[in-house]
């Protein structure tokens, strides 16, 4: 199956994960794609292909004769999509880009002034949305690239390789993708998630991450008799937010700079709750950010009374760099694979999370490869067909025995 046909089939499945759900996968619709992928893997010739009770899909390609002693290499992508935009009834279309703004509908465009990287795609064929949904290239492009590479290897037995493990996960977008991943059964010595952006990206550093919940308790009194009595929790929450450094918000940071991001706020005079995500690549600076949030809570409590602010901080995942550095040969292998495909590798930190961080922490070193997509999680998402073909070549190069 052609990679474009394969990708367009995958995005026809609605697989938005649901953070409020306590099931695995979080949405039953993820199971529909998982079952389809398991059957496709069997059809192209992967062995032991199937889906488990939690919605994880596994299969493997045996080593070519004489290469049984080579390390088992894994490739992993996720099936779910973000809830940042609708993932239902996606209407993708392909355009040949020759420059200028890309008009998706009468209200939504990808304008080259805002998205300066568009100039890098002149002359390429792009799959875009109709401006009403996300596309799903994050990460169905990765799924398509992995399976297209496996199909190529099966059709070209002259390409020598060791055993290859393939895994597709649910719920990566809500931070649970690696929670029930069967590392032992997967059987790889190391793996790569194929879940990145611009062609050539190679990442083995990600944020340390935590979620902070700030609960502000107020005293509500009728406004007609509120003087010296009312403590408005919504206003005290605003005061708390104002104590956090404005230059450490995501809209003012890049590269290795971390942030404290107000994700959600709900409340009234009596009770207000704010949810923050805290991110930093550096563990010391990560701790400092959490300390700043605690200091702000202490200040408000000292001013308005003990118990006014409750701060709960829960760590989510940690930087995988410490687990990759002892096995840097897997990074060198990926760099060479890119170069052999005529692609310049760009090693940079992930300003986000990845299944690979949990997997690396749990014993499966797992850096991240690009997919060739841009503008993930929104209506302006797109993927380059040429980049997808290149990533198939890169995956083949990684496993190829030289």
Image (cartoon, rainbow, N blue to C red):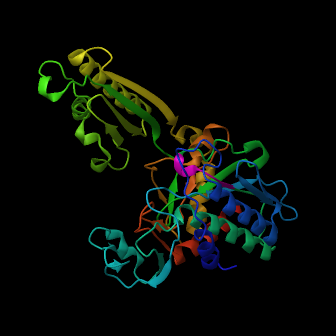
Question: Is residue 169 part of the magenta span, yes or no?
Answer: yes
User: 215 or 281, which is in the foreground?
Assistant: 215
Q: Is residue 278 magenta?
A: no
Report whether 320 appears left or right of 68: left
Front-most of residues 12 and 4? 12
Q: Quadrant of the N terminus?
A: bottom right
Q: Quick check: can you spot residue 84? A: yes
Residue visible at 63% across and 79% down?
5
Q: Quadrant of residue 35?
A: bottom right
Residue 251's place in the image compared with 96, above or below, is above
Q: Position of residue 88 (x, y in %)?
A: 52, 66
Residue 368 x, y percent position in the rendering? 56, 54
Residue at coordinates 26% horizontally, 71% vertically from top-left? 113
Q: Which residues are magenta?
A: 168-174
- Between 93 and 286, the one nearer to me in the picture: 93
Corner quadrant of residue 369: bottom right
From the viewer's perspective, is 258 left or right of 83?
left
């Amino acid at each position: 199956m052609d990679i474009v046909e394969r990708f367009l089939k995958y995005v026809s499945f609605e697989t938005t994960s649901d953070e409020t759900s306590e099931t695995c996968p979080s949405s039953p619709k993820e199971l529909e794609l998982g079952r389809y992928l398991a059957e496709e893997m069997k059809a192209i010739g992967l062995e032991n292909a199937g889906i488990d009770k939690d919605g994880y899909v596994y299969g493997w390609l045996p080593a070519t004769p004489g290469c049984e002693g080579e390390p088992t290499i894994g490739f992993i992508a996720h099936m779910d999509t973000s809830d940042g935009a609708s993932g239902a009834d996606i209407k993708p279309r392909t355009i040949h880009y020759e420059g200028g703004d890309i008009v998706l509908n009468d209200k939504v465009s990808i304008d080259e002034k805002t998205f300066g990287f568009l100039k890098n795609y002149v002359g390429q064929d792009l799959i875009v949305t109709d401006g009403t949904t996300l596309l799903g290239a994050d990460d169905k492009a990765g799924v398509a690239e992995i399976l297209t590479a496996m199909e190529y290897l099966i059709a070209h037995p002259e390409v020598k390789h060791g055993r290859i493990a393939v895994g597709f996960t649910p719920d990566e977008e809500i931070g649970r993708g690696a929670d029930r991943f069967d590392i032992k059964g997967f059987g790889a010595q190391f793996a790569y998630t194929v879940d990145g952006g611009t062609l050539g990206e190679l990442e083995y550093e990600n944020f340390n991450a935590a979620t902070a919940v700030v609960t502000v308790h107020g005293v509500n009194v009728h406004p007609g008799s509120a003087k010296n009595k009312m403590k408005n929790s919504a206003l005290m929450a605003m005061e708390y937010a104002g104590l956090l450094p404005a230059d450490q918000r995501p809209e003012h940071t890049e590269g290795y700079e971390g942030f404290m991001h107000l994700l959600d706020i709900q409340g009234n005079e009596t009770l207000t709750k704010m949810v923050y995500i805290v991110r930093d690549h550096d563990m010391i600076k990560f701790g400092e950010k959490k300390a700043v949030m605690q200091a702000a809570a202490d200040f408000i409590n000292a001013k308005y009374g003990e118990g006014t602010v409750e701060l709960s901080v829960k760590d989510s995942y940690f930087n995988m760099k410490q687990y990759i550095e002892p096995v840097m040969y897997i990074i060198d292998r990926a760099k060479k694979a890119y170069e052999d495909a005529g692609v310049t590798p760009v090693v940079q930190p992930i300003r986000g999370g990845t299944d690979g961080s949990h997997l690396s922490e749990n014993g499966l070193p797992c850096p991240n490869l690009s997919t060739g997509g841009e503008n993930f999680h929104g209506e302006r998402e797109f993927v380059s067909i040429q980049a997808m073909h290149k990533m198939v070549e890169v995956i083949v190069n990684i496993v190829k025995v030289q």
